[in-house]
Image (tube, rainbow, N blue to C red):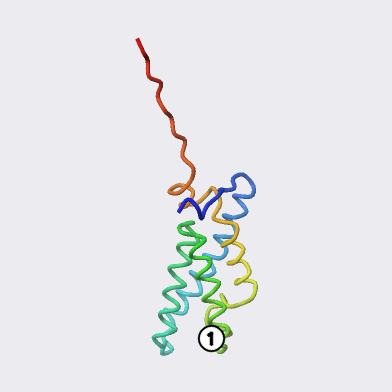
């Protein structure tokens, strides 16, 4: 996992990445929950896509496995846009070009210092105690 995350930007760039992650995650959570709650005969494929969008939205908001989830999200949005154009306009506006672009940007930039990825996979300070010789 260390090779995926070269750095974790902190300060204002880290806050900017946090805001971007929360915006994408909240959008996915709201749209997926609205799609799953609607009683209009949701087909299995759309329900599965909505549940994946919900899980990816939670992962974005928390910053857990961010680059992997961003790549999956961008590829899924592009695939829905190509193979199911009717879903692209009625189901999850994740398929808009702006959302796909933001997901690719997060995939390339990383999660930032304010994330679970930074906590679990970030750089560690190793302290080697001095040996006192007598």
Nearest the eye: 33 or 85: 85
Q: State the residue position of label 1.
A: 87
- At x 43%, y 68%, the residue is 55
Label 1: how many residues lie within 10 Å, few (<14), some (14-19) or many (20+)?
A: some
Q: Secondary structure at mark 1?
A: helix
Above or below, 27 relative to 12: below
Residue at x 50%, y 53% (from the top left corner) = 3
Q: Position of residue 41 (x, y in %)?
A: 41, 90
Residue at the left extreme of this rendering: 134
Residue 13 locus on image (x, y percent): 63, 50
Q: How many marks?
A: 1
Q: Quadrant of residue 46?
A: bottom left
User: Residue, x 46% and y 67% (percent of image)?
Assistant: 56
Residue 128 lies, in percent from the top left, at: 41, 28
Above or below for 27 versus 115: below
- Seen in the image, is 40 located left or right of residue 87? left
Left or right, residue 72 beside residue 99: left
Q: Furthest-front residue in view?
A: 133
| Residue found 56% across the figure and 62% down from its top | 107
List x then y, in percent, for residue 84: 53, 88
Q: Which quarter of the figure is the C terminus placed in?
A: top left
Q: Can you say which quadrant of the picture contains the N terminus?
A: bottom left
């Amino acid at each position: 996992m260390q090779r995926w995350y070269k750095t974790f930007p902190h300060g204002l760039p880290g806050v900017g990445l946090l805001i971007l992650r929360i915006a994408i995650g909240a959008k996915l959570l709201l749209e997926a929950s609205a799609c799953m709650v609607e009683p209009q005969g949701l087909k299995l494929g759309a329900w599965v896509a909505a549940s994946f969008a919900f899980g990816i939205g939670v992962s974005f908001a928390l910053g857990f496995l961010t680059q992997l989830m961003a790549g999956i999200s961008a590829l899924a949005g592009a695939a829905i846009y190509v193979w199911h154009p009717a879903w692209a306009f009625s189901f999850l506006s994740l398929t808009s070009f702006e959302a796909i672009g933001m997901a690719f940007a997060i995939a390339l930039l990383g999660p930032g210092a304010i994330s679970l990825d930074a906590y679990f996979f970030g750089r560690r300070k190793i302290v080697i105690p001095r040996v006192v010789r007598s």
